[in-house]
Amino acid sequence: MGDGLDELYKVSQAVLSVTRQMPVRDVLQVIVRSARSLVGARYAALGVPDEGDSFAEFVVDGISGAEWAAIGPLPRRHGMLGVLLDSGTTERLADIRADPRFEGWPAAHPNMSHFLGVPVKEGDTVLGIIFAANKVPAAAAGRGFTERDEEILSLFAAHAAIALTNARLYEHSRELSVLQERARLARELHDAVTQKLFGIRAHTRAAAVLAGREPADPGRVRAEIDVADALAAQAHAELRAIIDGLAPPDLQAGGLAESLRRYAGLAGRAHGGTVSFTAADLPALGTRTEAALYRVAQEALHNALRHSGAARIGLSLSRTGRRVVLEVSDDGRGFVPEAPSSGVGLASMAERAAAAGGKLTIRSGASGTLVRMTVPVGGDRWRGPSPS
């Protein structure tokens, strides 16, 4: 592969790493590795500052694990690293050790001379820094880093800025999803429990009034108490189902199929219905993928039990070729999945499926609703944060 094609290939790899929704640290590692190779440096690193005087992320290339461990804690925001972060300008030095702003390094730190540092920026905001040190091979080392090297490193800094910005937007989106999930749980508590508690109070008061009348009617008093007792049992069961839904069980201990079987039974009893459950022998999918399947099944069952008015609800796990298929079906009232009134639950399910490398489809009509999630077999293919 010629020099031009090799350069194009490494830039392409960095671009693809940004677009593939890889974990942000893995993306930064690809960027640093490619940048070090293309500018001909012995060392390269990329740092993202934290809120204090150190770094939240510091990715290096050209240093072995043993060498990195010997260096010690992450660097602080001082010396040339602090200059880059504070000034937001590029620094290209023939010898960093000769610069008056240089403040030294730990004893185990490799000795560096040529230095090229570029800020990673979004607009005027400095998100981090990327730098290369010690120009190689020997023939090029005498002249240090060039303007061409600076252009290349600036290109990779731009890719790093996109990756960091995407990660920040994803985190904001996840925080919004958490707030939406809390709002949904609050609505569930109101709909499923608060109304029943109001009913319990009404029937116990009626029983008290009837008990105080002359002549007393023990039969009617008992009937009111029985209704209040039944409502209390329903409220208890629904509250258990909601609390259980706050966090998935230990899927590794119980297994996905057994955990879903138990939840289907619990949710059915809480809502006064029955959920049929079937499961085939499944391969190991990875903890995060199984958690995503559990959460999608949980949300789909909740919707069917609470809103469909179905006589029959089914939950199944099966395998088709290289894919595992989760299906939740009911014969109740259908709905329009694209309608705004469908709520945030459907969007949450779709996001969980996509993050697990899978796909969610929903068919709904007069004869009922089918929620179907498919995921590939072969371990975790997670594209987002840990599911919660």
Image (tube, rainbow, N blue to C red):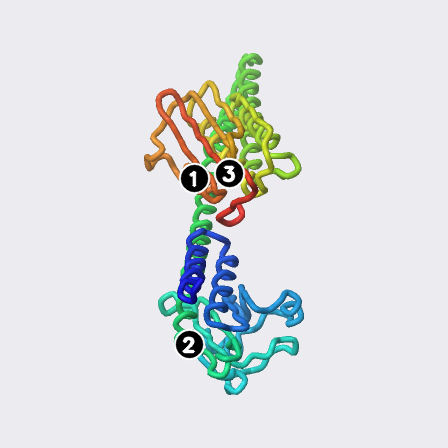
* Picture coordinates of residue 185, whole percent (x, y): 48, 39
Q: Which residue is mark 3?
A: 376
Residue extending farthest to the left is 339
Q: Which picture quadrant has residue 3? A: bottom left
* Rendered residue at 57%/36% (across/down): 244
Q: Earlier in the sequence, mark 3 or mark 2?
A: 2
Nearest the eye: 185 or 248: 248
| Mark number displayed over residue 94 | none
* Picture coordinates of residue 143, whole percent (x, y): 46, 83
Q: CA distance from mark 1 to mark 3?
A: 15 Å
* Picture coordinates of residue 371, whole percent (x, y): 44, 30
Q: Residue 358: in sight, yes or no?
A: yes
* Rendered residue at 36%/33% (across/down): 337
Q: In this rendering, which labeled residue sits more in front, label 3 or label 2?
A: 3
Disc 3: CA contacts within 10 A as few (<14), some (14-19) or many (>=20)? many
Check the picture and name the quadrant holding the N terminus.
Answer: bottom left
SS at badge 3: strand
Residue extending farthest to the front is 1
Nearest the eye: 108 or 229: 108
Q: Earlier in the sequence, mark 2 or mark 1?
A: 2
Q: CA distance from mark 2 to mark 1?
A: 42 Å
Q: Which residue is mark 1?
A: 350
Q: In this rendering, which labeled residue sits more in front, label 2 or label 1?
A: 2
Q: Which residue is mark 2?
A: 90
Amino acid type, label 2:
Thr
Q: Is residue 173 above or below residue 85?
A: above
Q: In this rendering, which labeled residue sits more in front, label 1 or label 3?
A: 3
Nearest the eye: 159 or 222: 159
Residue 270 shown left or right of residue 17 in the figure: right
Q: Earlier in the sequence, mark 1 or mark 3?
A: 1
* Picture coordinates of residue 22, whole percent (x, y): 48, 53
SS at badge 2: loop
